[in-house]
Amino acid sequence: LSDLSGQSMRFLDMGPGTVIEDATFVERARSVFLVGSIASTGGGILIRALLEADLDLGLIVASVTLHPDWVTRGFAVDASRRRAVLYEDRNGTGRVVVLDLYTGAERAVREVGHVPVTLSRRGLALDLERSEVFCAVGGFGARHDFLPVDAAGEDTPSAVLVLNADSLTVEATIPMPRAAGVRRLGLDRDSDRLVVLLEGIPSRIAVFGRSFRDYRGGVELPDEVSDMDVAGGYAVAPGRDGIYLVDLDLMSWGLIRLPLGIPGPITRFSPQASALV
């Protein structure tokens, strides 16, 4: 936990054998939510849980046990910290779960089919104002982990499902370009847009209207990027030579040159503050 001014730094020691699958920040509560697991010496998973860490105290203040056989491909927590929505993957097959954070009960579960092999840990986006969940599915080469080596991957349509945030019923399907796999989803709430990072060399960013699910346009970046975040009409994406800043209105990009080398994920971005890579 680092102060952006560089004046202080604290650590949460998660212990040996711990793997953090994903994390999200709830600004109103000054909390970070983590999905992680503890592996045994034999390679299996001993326990998997959703944890809440208080940023001011620097302590784990709550936990909910999760099923050990699944891996998180994206999750979100509402501002009141009452529920979480998780996109989970087991052997290439995905499901979306609405989890009650007070009781630990699964309030709704929806099987969504194949998980894109191109997907990072950011394949889900939540908008509670419209009670919508966006989830990336399908894509060329989607397959289970334990098929024979010479077996062909399954080619299923690449798409983003729009689910009701309470019941998880499918309300719409937004088709993606056939030859492209989804890597990351983002919501530009100010302009009512869904922003999709598509896998490839170079990477592409596609923009869709959320009301009519229509394609608005896209930007092809000159290099492959590792992740993307969206805020205030802009998308930011870290690449080998720096951070790409994409204007989603003009469909143009600029590069902030930084020696990132092999960039990782972006954990938070706002136009008035910082991008943490």
Image (cartoon, rainbow, N blue to C red):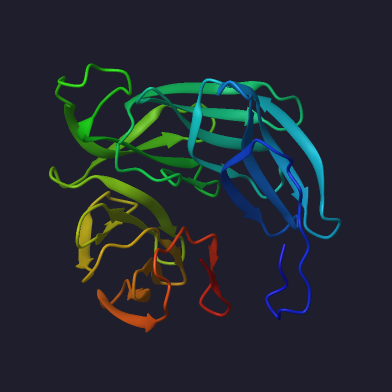
Residue 172 at least partly seen = yes
Snapshot quadrant of residue 247 = bottom left
The percent coordinates of residue 69 (x first, y second) are 52, 20
Q: Position of residue 77 (x, y in %)?
A: 62, 44
Residue at the image position 33 percent from the left and 32 percent from the top: 115
Q: Is residue 188 left or right of residue 172?
A: right
**Which image quadrant is residue 186 in?**
bottom left
Q: Give above or below for 171 relative to 69.
A: below
Residue 121 percent coordinates (x, y): 45, 44
Q: Residue furthest right?
A: 57
Q: Is residue 3 above or below residue 77?
A: below
Point 68% across, 60% down: residue: 27
Give whichever of 136, 210 is nearer the camera: 136
Q: Quadrant of residue 254?
A: bottom left
Q: Nearer the viewer, residue 38 or 75?
A: 38
Q: Which residue is at the far front? A: 41
Residue 208 sits above or below residue 256 on the image: above
Please tell me which residue lies in front, 108 or 148.
148
Q: Position of residue 239 (x, y in %)?
A: 35, 68
Is residue 203 left or right of 75 when viewed as pictured? left
Count the marks.
Answer: 0
Say which residue appears at 75% left-offset and 25% top-offset.
103
Task: Tell me if 107 is positioned left or right of 31 in this view.
Answer: left
The residue lying at 44 percent from left, 64 percent from top is: 230
Rendered view: 12 above or below 152: below
Question: Would you say residue 82 is visible in this rendering?
Answer: no
Q: Quadrant of the N terminus?
A: bottom right
